[in-house]
Amino acid sequence: MSDRYLEQRISIKFCVKLNKSASETHHLLKEAYGNEVMSRARVFDWHKRFKEGREDVRDDARSGRPVTHRTDENIQKVKDLVCSNRQLTVRMMAEELNLDKETVRLILKENLNMKKVSAKVASGILKDEPKPRKLDFRSDLSKETKKKSSCVRRKSLPYQILANAVPVASPFS
């Protein structure tokens, strides 16, 4: 909850100690906070709580699942798992770490700056690496054709080009 509501709850508690009614309290809050005032029902609810002896101005803890599992520990676990095997799917990582698939996906995307590439996870760091030289088979083919003119040698030409080609990094390796 935002700080403005916390501040308003403190003001409500103060009004209760001054023996102001819930209506008077709501009117004073409207004057002080304008359009950002709590609803009338919330003011009456908090007024009643403080009148019954409540001291804490913070919201009660809610039962159920915690809001997030994106802790530093879980982020490190996901990072270690991805580094050990980049071919794991989000589902496989979630099952291995006993986390929700969406939690794992958000950790990969927002915390580790990673994204999916051809069904595999690749780091955003790869963007900064220089791209490997792409082969232009047409120009290589024309150069080789000029060098070798016999038909027999032309049949073996593609294999020679591939033998001289620079290996291209694959996202699957």
Image (cartoon, grey):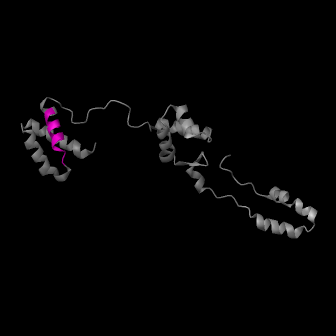
Tell whether position 40 is magenta.
yes
State the residue in front, 170 or 75: 170
Image coords of residue 99 (percent x, y): 49, 34
Image coords of residue 39 (percent x, y): 18, 44
Query: Could you say which quadrant of the image residue 65 lies in?
Result: top left
Q: Main secondary structure of the magenta part?
A: helix
Picture residue at 47% right of the left edge, 40% below the top? 102
Query: Could you say which quadrant of the image residue 69 lies in?
Result: top left
Is residue 90 found left or right of 173 in the rendered image?
A: left
State the residue in front, 62 or 155: 155
In this rendering, the count of numbered labels is 0
Is residue 67 found left or right of 155 in the rendered image?
A: left
Q: Which residues are magenta?
A: 37-48
Q: Is residue 96 above or below residue 82?
A: above
Is residue 160 found left or right of 104 in the rendered image?
A: right
Tell whether position 140 is magenta.
no
Is residue 165 found left or right of 47 in the rendered image?
A: right
Q: Is residue 6 above or below residue 33?
A: above
Picture residue at 90% right of the left edge, 67% below the top? 148
Query: Could you say which quadrant of the image residue 130 lies in?
Result: bottom right
Question: In the picture, which quadrant includes the N terminus?
Answer: top left
Image coords of residue 31 (percent x, y): 12, 51
Q: Is residue 110 above or below residue 92?
A: below
Image coords of residue 129 (percent x, y): 62, 56
